[in-house]
Image (spheres, rainbow, N blue to C red):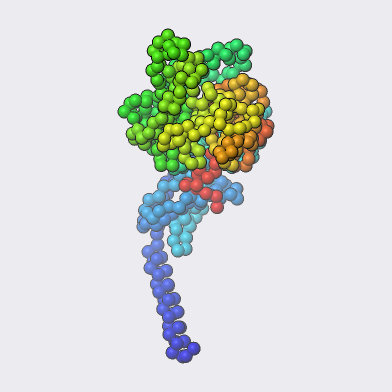
C-alpha cells in the first residue's frame, strides 16, 4: 500500500467517524422528554390497566412490565412513531403490585426509571367459585392458556378464566345474552348474541320410551330453539366492541334468527347457520296435505350485513327418498355446529343424521358424509350421535363432541380421514365418566399440550382431560356453558409478549 493510498484510507475512516459522531449528536442533541404518564382502568376492571404516554417529540415507545418479585417479564408489542401512545396491559392479576418501565426506541434505547402501580381487589360481581380443591384442579394441565365461557343470561358476558378459577378477561353486554364466542383470523372475538332464555343444569337420565318420544318431536322447540341468536358482535382483545349486527337489520331482514354457530372466514366474512323451510304437499309421504318442513342452511355476509352467499339443505336433499320426512318434518336435520375444513369448505354437524357433512363453499354440493351410514369406512364402535362442536384439531384430524344420545356417555372423538380410500381411523376416544353425560350441547378441543378441553353443558362442567377421558382439571359453572374454547397464549401477541 502506497503512502498516498494509506492517507486516503485513514482520511476516509476519520470522515466516517466524524459523520457518525455528528449523527449521534444530531439525534440526541434535542432529547425526547416524557411529558406525562397516565394510568387508567377501563371499565373499572381490576385485571386491566391502560398506560398513556405523551412525549414532547415523536418517537416509538414500548412498555416493559412485570409482577413485583417475579423474574418473568413482559414487553408490549411494537409501537409506531408518535407523540401519544396508549398501552393495554391485559391479564393482570388482581390485588398485585406491578413494576414497569417506559422505553423510548432509538439507536440506543432510553429507559425511564422503574415505576409501579397496584391492581385493586377483584370486583365482587366477578368472583365465582369456578375451581374447587375438592375436584380435580391441576392447573398445569391447561398449559399456558385460559378458558373462554359465555353467559346467555342477563347481563350477557364473555369471560376468560385461568387455571385457579380467576377471571382474567371480561366483556359484558347489558341488553342481551351471549350464546357462544369464538376467535377470528384477525385475532378478535366473534360472539353470537341472543335474548336471554333460561337453561337448566339438569340432565336426569330418561327411560328409553321418553327418549323415543323426544326424538319424535326433536329437541328444537319452535323457530328460535334453545340455541337461537338474534345478533352478532366482534370484540377486540381490549374488550372494545368493533361492531354489532342485529339480524332484523341484516341481509334485508330475511333472516331474523341464526342458531348454534357463527364464524369468520379468512376473508373477514361472517358465516352462520340459519333455518330454512320448504313447503311441500305431504300426501305422498303419509301426510294430510300442504305442510312446512323445517330445515337448515348457511348464510355468508359481510360485517355490514350484506348477504353474499346462501345454502339450503333442501337444495341437496331428495325428499322422495327420505323415509323419515314425515317423522321429523319440522326439524329434519338439526344442524348444530359449523366450522371450516383446511381447504376452506364447510363442515356441519347434522345431529338428527348422526353425521358430519362437508359442504362445498362455492357450489353447495355435499362432498362427503362421516358417521353412521356415511361415506367412510370406520369402526362402528366409534359411531357418534347428536354430536356437537365439529373442528379440525392441531393434528389435522376431525374432532367432535359425541353426546352419545343412545349410550348415555359423552366425550371427545377424533378421526384421521383418508379421502382417497375413504376410511376414517379413530385416533382419540376420550369418554367422560357417566356422571358427566350431556344429551345436548357440549364441545371438545385438542390443547397444545395434548390434553383435551371438554364441556359437559347440562352438568355445568368444563374439564381438561387426558386422551383417555380422565379428568385432570374441572370448572364448575353456575350457568349452562354451551361450549368452552381454549385461549392460547399467542392470542395476546398483538398486545404483549414474554421477554
Residue 475 seen in this snapshot: no
Relative to residue 499, is residue 394 depicted above or below? above
- Closer to us: 465 or 351: 351
The residue drawn where x is 44% and y is 58% is 105
Q: Position of residue 351 (x, y in %)?
A: 53, 24
Residue 265, percent from left and from top: 44, 39
- Horizontal side of 157 relative to 70 (left or right) equals left
Q: Residue at x 43, y 80 (%)?
A: 12
**Residue 127: quadrant of the picture:** top right
Q: Position of residue 25 (x, y in %)?
A: 40, 69
- The residue sitting at the bottom extreme is 3
Residue 30 point in image, percent of width and height: 37, 64
User: Observer-nearest residue: 95 or 215?
Assistant: 215
- The total of numbered circles placed on residues is 0
249 with respect to 13 (left or right): left
227 w.r.t. 49: above or below? above
Residue in view at x 45 percent, y 35 percent: 360
Tell me, yes or no, if residue 318 can be seen here. Answer: yes
> Which residue appears farthest toward the top when viewing the image?
288
The answer to whether residue 333 is above or below residue 94 is: above
**Residue at position x 40%, y 62% in the image:** 31
Q: Looking at this view, is 464 or 332 the one in front?
A: 332
Amino acid at each position: 500500500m502506497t503512502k498516498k493510498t494509506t492517507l486516503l484510507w485513514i482520511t476516509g475512516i476519520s470522515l466516517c467517524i466524524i459523520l457518525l459522531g455528528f449523527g449521534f449528536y444530531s439525534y440526541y442533541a434535542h432529547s425526547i422528554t416524557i411529558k406525562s404518564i397516565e394510568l387508567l382502568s377501563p371499565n373499572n376492571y381490576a385485571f386491566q390497566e391502560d398506560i398513556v404516554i405523551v412525549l414532547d417529540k415523536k418517537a416509538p415507545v414500548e412498555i416493559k412490565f412485570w409482577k413485583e418479585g417475579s423474574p418473568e417479564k413482559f414487553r408490549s408489542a411494537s409501537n409506531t412513531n408518535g407523540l401519544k401512545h396508549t398501552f393495554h396491559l391485559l391479564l393482570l392479576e388482581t390485588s398485585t403490585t406491578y413494576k414497569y418501565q417506559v422505553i423510548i426506541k432509538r439507536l440506543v434505547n432510553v429507559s425511564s426509571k422503574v415505576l409501579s402501580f397496584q391492581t385493586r381487589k377483584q370486583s365482587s360481581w366477578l368472583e365465582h367459585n369456578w375451581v374447587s380443591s375438592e375436584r380435580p384442579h391441576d392447573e398445569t394441565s391447561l398449559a399456558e392458556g385460559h378458558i373462554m365461557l359465555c353467559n346467555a343470561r342477563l347481563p350477557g358476558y364473555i369471560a376468560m378464566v385461568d387455571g385457579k378459577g380467576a377471571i382474567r378477561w371480561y366483556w359484558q353486554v347489558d341488553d342481551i345474552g351471549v350464546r357462544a364466542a369464538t376467535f377470528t383470523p384477525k385475532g378478535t372475538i366473534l360472539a353470537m348474541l341472543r335474548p336471554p332464555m333460561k337453561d337448566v343444569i339438569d340432565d336426569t337420565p330418561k327411560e328409553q320410551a321418553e327418549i323415543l318420544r323426544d326424538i319424535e318431536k326433536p329437541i328444537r322447540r319452535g323457530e328460535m330453539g334453545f340455541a337461537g341468536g338474534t345478533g352478532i358482535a366482534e370484540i377486540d382483545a381490549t374488550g372494545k366492541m368493533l361492531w354489532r349486527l342485529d339480524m332484523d337489520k341484516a341481509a334485508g331482514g330475511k333472516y331474523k334468527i341464526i342458531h348454534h354457530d357463527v364464524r369468520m372466514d379468512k376473508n373477514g366474512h361472517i358465516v352462520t347457520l340459519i333455518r330454512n323451510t320448504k313447503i311441500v304437499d305431504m300426501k305422498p309421504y303419509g301426510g294430510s296435505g300442504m305442510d312446512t318442513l323445517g330445515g337448515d342452511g348457511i348464510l355468508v355476509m359481510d360485517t355490514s350485513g350484506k348477504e353474499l352467499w346462501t345454502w339450503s339443505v333442501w337444495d341437496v336433499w331428495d325428499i322422495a327418498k327420505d323415509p323419515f320426512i314425515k317423522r321429523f318434518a319440522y326439524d329434519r336435520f338439526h344442524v348444530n355446529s359449523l366450522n371450516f375444513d383446511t381447504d376452506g369448505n364447510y363442515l356441519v354437524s347434522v345431529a338428527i343424521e348422526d353425521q358430519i357433512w362437508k359442504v362445498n363453499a362455492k357450489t353447495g354440493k355435499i362432498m362427503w358424509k362421516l358417521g353412521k351410514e356415511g361415506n367412510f369406512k370406520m369402526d362402528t364402535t366409534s359411531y357418534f350421535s347428536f354430536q356437537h362442536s365439529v373442528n379440525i384439531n392441531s393434528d389435522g384430524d376431525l374432532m367432535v363432541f359425541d353426546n352419545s344420545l343412545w349410550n348415555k356417555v359423552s366425550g371427545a372423538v377424533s378421526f384421521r380421514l383418508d379421502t382417497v380410500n375413504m376410511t376414517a381411523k379413530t385416533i382419540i376416544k376420550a369418554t367422560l365418566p357417566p356422571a358427566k353425560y350431556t344429551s345436548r350441547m357440549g364441545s371438545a378441543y385438542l390443547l397444545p399440550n395434548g390434553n383435551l378441553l371438554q364441556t359437559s353443558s347440562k352438568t355445568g362442567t368444563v374439564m381438561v382431560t387426558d386422551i383417555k377421558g380422565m379428568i385432570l382439571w374441572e370448572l364448575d359453572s353456575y350457568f349452562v356453558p354451551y361450549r368452552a374454547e381454549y385461549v392460547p397464549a399467542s392470542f395476546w401477541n398483538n398486545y404483549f409478549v414474554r421477554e
